[in-house]
Image (cartoon, grey):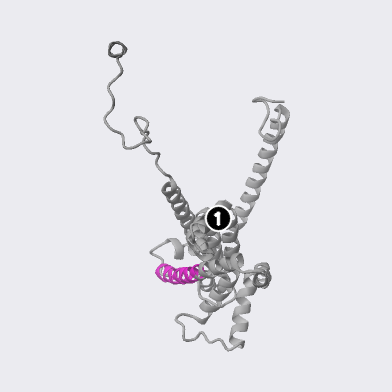
Amino acid sequence: MNGPEQGVLHDRPGPKARRRALVGSLIAAVALLGAGGIVVRRLADAGQFSSRRWAPLVDPSAPEFAQVWALLGTGLRQTLIAAALAITASMIVGTLLGVARMMLGRWGRVPLIGVMELLRGLPVVITIFFAYRVLPTLGVDVSFLPGEDGLWYLLVGLTVYNSVVIAEILRAGVRSLPGGQREAALTIGLTSGQTMRMVLLPQAFRVMLPSLISQLVVILKDTSLGGMLGLYTETLRQANRISQLLGNPLQLYLVVGVLFILINGSLSFLAQRLEQGLARGRRVPLAEKPVGPADPAGPVGPADPPLDLRTADRAV
């Protein structure tokens, strides 16, 4: 059936189907509200909404308020430092890996692909723990570097995993470009390296910007694994220490979750604005339409006077 009565992919549901969908949605909503009410009641019975548990976080007059937020601020600063270092290292190493995979010959590319697939298949917590246990065994000393030793083990683990993912994102971006881009660059005399660096990679970064930003947000969230493994004193580990003293883990983890949501939301917002700015920069204004046709024989001179048939007849 053609026409407005048909949906894009399937026929529009009839009255009975719409009624069943409405009834099912209402039942699911009631069930969710009921489950939420039970959870809230259980939390209230356990005293989770008491002012004693929330005051250190929301009441500036509480004696623990300043110290709690100072510790959380320190942990948040440590999280941002680790995320910034891991993001920078992952972008650099991931770009080099992606370019090497696309430009190496067959005998050099096959071993590289094997290593990349192996690292991509490992959970990121394994790579972090592997760096923490293996690097000291191999004699790698990070004590001369600033900050905690766990920061650098966390950095190595996050970089090893995420650089492989970023390399695949960039490779997919380059492959999505029209083949004429490479051919045109080679035709005007650019080498393969110059073509990749000056023509393909800038476009691939713009094309894959949403995926790259999503992976950067993942790196920020994965910094909490350093606290879970006890390697690094970041936001989550600070919250765990505070909750052991104050006895309010639920409240502290909720606050930490809100902080991460705000940071990740800000990154996503900045990514959207950056993508919009790049899209505006790629727009080329249309040239003004010429008033008259140009003379192919040379520059356009003064316009000829209009032809008068009567004058032309007398001249003949």
Along the viewing direction, whichever of 43 and 202 lies nearer the viewer: 202
Image vertical order of residue 124 relative to residue 284, above or below:
below
Residue 49 visible in image? no
Name which residue lies at 38% across and 38% down: 287
Bounds of the magenta segment: 65-88
Of residues 313 and 14, the one nearer the viewer is 313
Left or right, 161 with reference to 61: right
Q: Nearer the viewer, residue 9 or 61?
A: 9
Residue 86 lies in the magenta stretch: yes
* Residue 279 point in image, percent of width and height: 45, 48
Name the secondary structure under disc 1.
Answer: helix
View extreme (bottom): residue: 139
Quadrant housing the N terminus: top right
Residue marked by disc 1: 183
* Amino acid identity at mark 1: Glu
Please name whichever residue, 109 or 313, is drawn nearer the observer in this view of the structure.
313
- The reply to whether the magenta stretch includes residue 95 is no
The local crowd at label 1, few if under 14, some if 14 to 19, many if 20 or more residues have their Cα within 10 Å, is few
Vertical arrangement, residue 267 with respect to residue 159, above or below:
above
x and y percent of residue 256 in the render? 51, 63
For image coordinates 42% across by 47% down, the residue present is 280
